[in-house]
Image: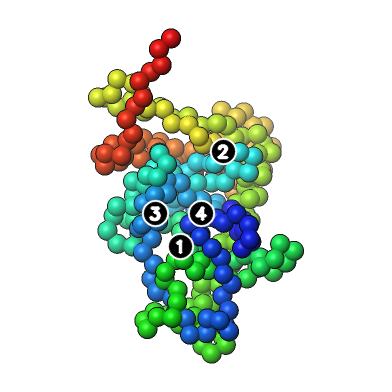
Amino acid sequence: MASSAPNATLPLFYNGIQPLSSQLHASWKSRPLDMQPILATQHAIPLTVEEFAVAQRHYPIVFSVGDNAVPLALMGLNEGINVFAEAEGNAPDIYVPAYVRRYPFMLAKLRPDAEELSLCFDPSSGNIGQFEDGQPLFDGETPSQTTQAILQFCEQFEQAGARTNLFMEEVRKAGLLMDGEVTVQPSDADQPFVYRGFQMIDEAKVQELRGDELRKMNQSGLLALIYAHLFSLPLIKDVFAKQMSQGKVPAQQPAAQA
């Protein structure tokens, strides 16, 4: 969830990172960005804990695999498929994660040893440049109101990312994560579709927690986040139904013969 330095592995969506400069980009402008082409091929998008309450009404919230798991908005059950990305307009007719809305901007360290974060952008996005139309990024050498609003949003995203990291640390410490598996049996299919490759919270382990642990989680807001995740999981079958109706469910492979 944390931002990466320009010379590190780039985060999802970003093809490059360039610091925004009043000297180099004094006359540049920002135009609205059509995210549809990017979203159409992304089936899972990072979420922050601040978004769980609203996101769990729209799509499943799961966690990535590995030790450094992050929350994900699951918008498709197969790589390269987003069942919500075909709505007309610049964004799906659902809650759009903050991770998407901050693009092509982000805060990043200009050097690995730097302490401060700088406002950067992806120069390949196509919506930032020397255009005749659009919102100016600078007023002379001073950041414009547009840039100030972008900076504030990116700062809020970083703060939410830090709180998300703390949530994940507590979940791991409590041993609540387990490998996820969902089985969907369409009425017209001979075999069920089985989906893996994600993590979820083990509800049985939550129910086994001691009273003092539950009270602490409830007081910190952790318990509400856990149940927002759990309440969202039935939507996996809704995502499957959307894939089926859109003809995006991969053909099943024949079962291996003994």
Task: Find disc 1 in the rendering and name its residue.
Answer: 101
Q: Amino acid at mark 1?
A: Arg
Q: Is residue 218 left or right of residue 241?
A: right
Q: Amino acid at mark 4?
A: Leu
Please report the residue visible at 36 percent of the width from the left and 51 percent of the height from the top.
40
Q: Residues within 10 Å of mark 2 (few under 14, many from 20)?
A: some
Task: Find disc 3 in the rendering and name its residue.
Answer: 39
Mark in the foreground, 3 or 1:
3
Q: How many marks?
A: 4
Task: Find disc 2 in the rendering and name its residue.
Answer: 65
Residue 48 x, y percent position in the rendering: 54, 53
Please report the residue visible at 56 percent of the width from the left and 75 percent of the height from the top.
20
Rendered view: 42 above or below 139: above
Per the model, the C-alpha gap separating discs 2 and 1 is 24 Å
Query: Judging from the image, what secondary structure is the residue with disc 2 in?
Result: loop
Q: Is residue 111 left or right of residue 25?
A: right
Per the model, the C-alpha gap separating discs 3 and 2 is 21 Å
Q: Amino acid at mark 3?
A: Leu
Q: Earlier in the sequence, mark 2 or mark 4?
A: 4
